[in-house]
Amino acid sequence: MSNPIIYHLHDIAKSYRGRSTPAVLVPGVMEIRRGEICVIVGPSGAGKSTLLRILGMIEPPTAGWLMFDNQRYDANTQPALSYRRRVVYLFQRPLLLSQSVYDNVNYGLRVRGIKDEQNRVQRAIAQVGLQHLTHANTRTLSGGEAQRVALARALVIEPDILLLDEPTANLDPANVEVIERVIRERNQQQGMTIVLVTHNLFQARRLAQQVGLMLDGKLIEYARASAFFESPVDPRTSAFIRGDMIF
Amino acid sequence: MLWSVILLSLQVSGLALLFAAFIGVPFGAWLALTRFRGRSLVLAVLYTCMGLPPVVVGLMVYLLLSQTGPFAQLQWLFTTNAMVMAQTAISTPIVAGTVMAAVSGVEPDLRRQLLSLGATPLRAMWDVIFEARFGVLLALVAGFGRNISEVGAVMLVGGNIEGFTRVLTTAIVLETRQGKFDLAVSLGLVLLGVSFLVNGLLLVLQTRTNGVWRAV
């Protein structure tokens, strides 16, 4: 039996100032199921991050609507804090405060008024392998370490949905391995729903249960990972999987 | 006499800085973090106010508090209240403009990241301001420097009354006019020393909040 639907997107479009017509990101319907890892692939500028920001309720869609756990969200809706707090969006660049690693990872608990009585912060830091840097200032971290701190900061809250925008872009294989391992662990152990955007097809193969391909600001194919990689419907998906130059 | 003049200078300029910070820090941060129609006009006015001639501010405050002004009933003219009011008007745009520049320098997506981590809009704004704390401290240093060294406005609205509204800058003007150059120079050195001490204190505070020295 398949998992219940957590996100239901309907004709989502987004436009920015200076562009006359809204770009249709999701024509028709797209659904994301609870407890799955959904990976959106596509070249740079395809609209992947925009779609992810809409899922994270950081930006409203210009047209269309989405249902998040039976709560409708559209251009005219401000998401309630209680809903917003169930979803965490992680920007591509690790946006850390100039404080210690501990204070950064503790941030989500602090703003919720939760005291870290069960060492959740320490456990999250340990999960990304940075316990030796717990009290280091984030300005002293490397790019990979900073990204791992950003991931730990999102995980400590234990959100229902984790949205990751190119979490391993420009990282070395060792850091990529840590981040992918943590993503898999949280998904398998806690049933955390994870939506991840990447232009790395190999990463999609390693992680995804559901895959979508975006090209030129539009979702052109969305399917189970096995069907997406083995029997894609759209010829552009086949070309993308083959590694042809499409954009 | 000297100590009372120094203390009054610190009291007037410090209080004015407090009011300027109370208004200027949130206003500057709000300007940095929001986009609205007419923002460019507000910025143009703010930048103009950052360079306001103190004597013009003094004149405006004088007119507001004079017998025919709208706030005559306060009877603040030639009191320290009027001096604080004038210096607040002078330093608020400086604090707001510098804070705006500092907060604008913080990564723009940081606020959205904090919101996504569950912060309320007010909490996220506060944390972004704290992230720009070195720039905010610089704004306070600049505001205090402007206040303590200002002479035109306090002379107009305070009147340089001995033991009542005389501060270091107005005392220097008086002693110079009377030809007591030695005393005027001494007072000038005291003014520099006071300014150095206060700024040094703020810099120590900056170093402590940072743990290590970092250029603004």
Image: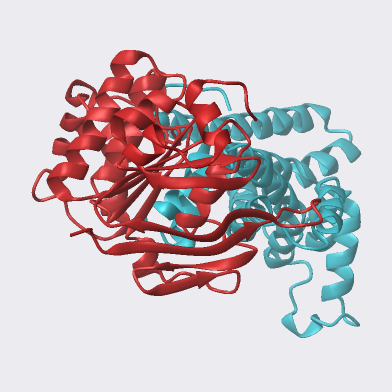
> Is B64 on the left-hand or right-hand side of A123?
right
Taking the spot 36% from the left edge, 74% from the top edge, the residue there is A70
> Is B69 on the left-hand or right-hand side of B144?
right
Percent of width and height locating residue A241 = 47, 27
Q: Count the labels in the image.
A: 0
Taking the spot 75% from the left edge, 62% from the top edge, the residue there is B36
Looking at the image, residue B72 lies above or below residue B215: below
Q: Residue furthest left?
A: A118
As drawn, the chain in red is: A
As drawn, the chain in cyan is: B
Percent of width and height locating residue A110 = 28, 53
Quadrant occupied by the N terminus of chain A: bottom left
Q: Residue furthest bottom?
A: B73
Percent of width and height locating residue A118 = 8, 48
Query: Looking at the rendering, which quadrant does residue B72 occupy?
Result: bottom right
Task: Decide which of A89, B134 is in the foreground and name it.
Answer: A89
Task: Decide which of A51, B39 is in the foreground and name it.
Answer: A51
> Is A10 on the left-hand or right-hand side of A104?
right
Percent of width and height locating residue A163 = 39, 46
Residue B67 visible in the snapshot:
yes
Task: Decide which of B71, A243 is in the foreground and name it.
Answer: A243
User: How is colour applied across the structure in the image?
Assistant: by chain
Query: Looking at the rendering, which quadrant does residue A46 occupy?
Result: top right
Taking the spot 40% from the left edge, 38% from the top edge, the residue there is A228
Taking the spot 79% from the left edge, 51% from the top edge, the residue there is A19
Task: Decide which of B25, B106 is in the foreground and name it.
Answer: B106
> Is B22 on the left-hand or right-hand side of B70?
left
Residue B129 visible in the snapshot:
no
Quadrant occupied by the C terminus of chain A: top right
